[in-house]
Image: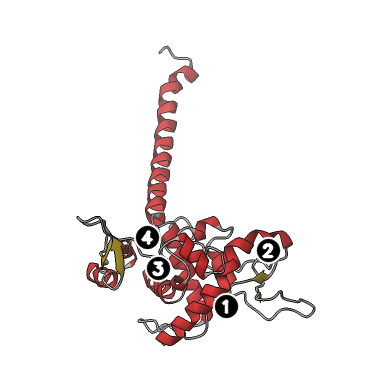
C-alpha cells in the first residue's frame, strides 16, 4: 500500500506541475461541464461539519494530496477541532521532522514535530517545489475551497471529472481530459483510485467517497470557524428580531396618545 502511495505521489507530483501555471490558459479556452452539487452537512443556517468525514478527508490529504500540495495555514493542534484527541495529534505531529533554529551556534536543526507546528509541506521552499514540478508551483490547499468558484462542489467535481475524451477531442501531450476543468485539458493525472486508502471506520474508499471527504476537509481548512460564525449569526438575528418587537410595541405605547389626540 505504501508503495502505491509513493508511486501515486510521484505521478501526481509530475502531472500536476502545470496546473497552477496552466489554469489561466485553460480557462481562456472555455468549455467545462456543470458542477456537481452535493448536499453538504455544513450548508444552510444550521449546517455543521461532519467530524467523521473531516477525519477521512484529512487521511486522503495526508496519504495522497500531500505528495504535492501544502496545507500551510493549518497547525497540528487545529486537528482537535475535527475530532482528533490531543494524544492523537501529539502522536501525529511526532511523525514529522520540523526544521527549527537557529541554535546557540547559529545553525538550523531538525526536531520532532509538536502540536503547535504547522503541517509541513512536501517541499522546503518554492524553488525546490518548482524544480520538482517542471517549473510550476503546486498550489497550497489551505484556502482552495474559498478561492475557487463553487468551493467544495468544484473540488469534488474536479476530482470525479476525469473521463476518456469524447470523440473528436485530441489531447495535448501530457494532458488529461477533465469535464469540469476549464478547457477540459488538465496536466494533473487522476489522483484518486478505488481503495487507495483504507479508512479506519470501514467506509468504502470509492473515488466518490474520497473526493467528497477531502472536499469536506478542505472546506473546513479554508473556514474552520464556520460553525462559530453561523452560531453567532443566528444569535444576532434572534437578538434583532426581539429588539424589533420591543421597539414596535414601545413605539405604539409612546405614540398612541398622540394618535388619540390626547395631551402628552
Q: Is residue 229 left or right of residue 19?
A: left
The extreme front residue here reads: 105
Q: Is residue 33 left or right of residue 202?
A: right
> 10 Å neighbourhood of mark 3: few (<14), some, or many (≥20)?
some
Instruction: Give the labeled residue for mark 3.
Output: 50
For the residues bearing labels 4 and 2, Cβ distance under 8 angstroms: no
Q: Tag 2 or tag 4, which sits nearer the N-term? A: 2
Residue 226: quarter of image: bottom left
> 10 Å neighbourhood of mark 2: few (<14), some, or many (≥20)?
some
Residue 22 drawn above or below residue 263 = below
Q: Tag 1 or tag 4, which sits nearer the N-term? A: 4
> What numbered label is drawn on residue 190?
1
Residue at the image point whose x is 54% and y is 60% from the top? 151
Q: Secondary structure at mark 1?
A: loop
Quarter of the figure that contains the N terminus: bottom left
Instruction: Give the labeled residue for mark 2.
Output: 26
Q: Secondary structure at mark 3?
A: loop
Quarter of the figure that contains the C terminus: top left
Residue at the image point whose x is 44% and y is 81% from the top? 6
Q: Is residue 47 visible?
A: no
Q: Secondary structure at mark 2?
A: helix
The alpha-carbon separation of the residues under discs 1 and 3 comes to 26 Å
* Count of numbered tags: 4
Amino acid at each position: 500500500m505504501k508503495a502505491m502511495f509513493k508511486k501515486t505521489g510521484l505521478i501526481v507530483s509530475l502531472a500536476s506541475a502545470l496546473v497552477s501555471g496552466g489554469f489561466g490558459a485553460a480557462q481562456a479556452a472555455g468549455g467545462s461541464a456543470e458542477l456537481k452539487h452535493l448536499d453538504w452537512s455544513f450548508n444552510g443556517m444550521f449546517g455543521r461539519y461532519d467530524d467523521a468525514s473531516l477525519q477521512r478527508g484529512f487521511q486522503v490529504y495526508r496519504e495522497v494530496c500531500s505528495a504535492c500540495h501544502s496545507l500551510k495555514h493549518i497547525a497540528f493542534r487545529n486537528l482537535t477541532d475535527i475530532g482528533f484527541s490531543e494524544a492523537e495529534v501529539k502522536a501525529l505531529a511526532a511523525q514529522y521532522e520540523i526544521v527549527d533554529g537557529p541554535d546557540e551556534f547559529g545553525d538550523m536543526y531538525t526536531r520532532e514535530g509538536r502540536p503547535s507546528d504547522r503541517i509541513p509541506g512536501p517541499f522546503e521552499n518554492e524553488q525546490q517545489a518548482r524544480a520538482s514540478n517542471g517549473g510550476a508551483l503546486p498550489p497550497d490547499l489551505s484556502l482552495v475551497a474559498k478561492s475557487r468558484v463553487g468551493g467544495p462542489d468544484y473540488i469534488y467535481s474536479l476530482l470525479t471529472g476525469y473521463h476518456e475524451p469524447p470523440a473528436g477531442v485530441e489531447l495535448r501531450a501530457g494532458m488529461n481530459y477533465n469535464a469540469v476543468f476549464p478547457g477540459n485539458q488538465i496536466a494533473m493525472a487522476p489522483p484518486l483510485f478505488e481503495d487507495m486508502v483504507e479508512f479506519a471506520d470501514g467506509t468504502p474508499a470509492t473515488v466518490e467517497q474520497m473526493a467528497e471527504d477531502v472536499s469536506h476537509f478542505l472546506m473546513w481548512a479554508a473556514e474552520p470557524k464556520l460553525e462559530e460564525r453561523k452560531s453567532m449569526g443566528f444569535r444576532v438575528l434572534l437578538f434583532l428580531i426581539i429588539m424589533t418587537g420591543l421597539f414596535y410595541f414601545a413605539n405604539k405605547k409612546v405614540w398612541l396618545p398622540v394618535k388619540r389626540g390626547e395631551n402628552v
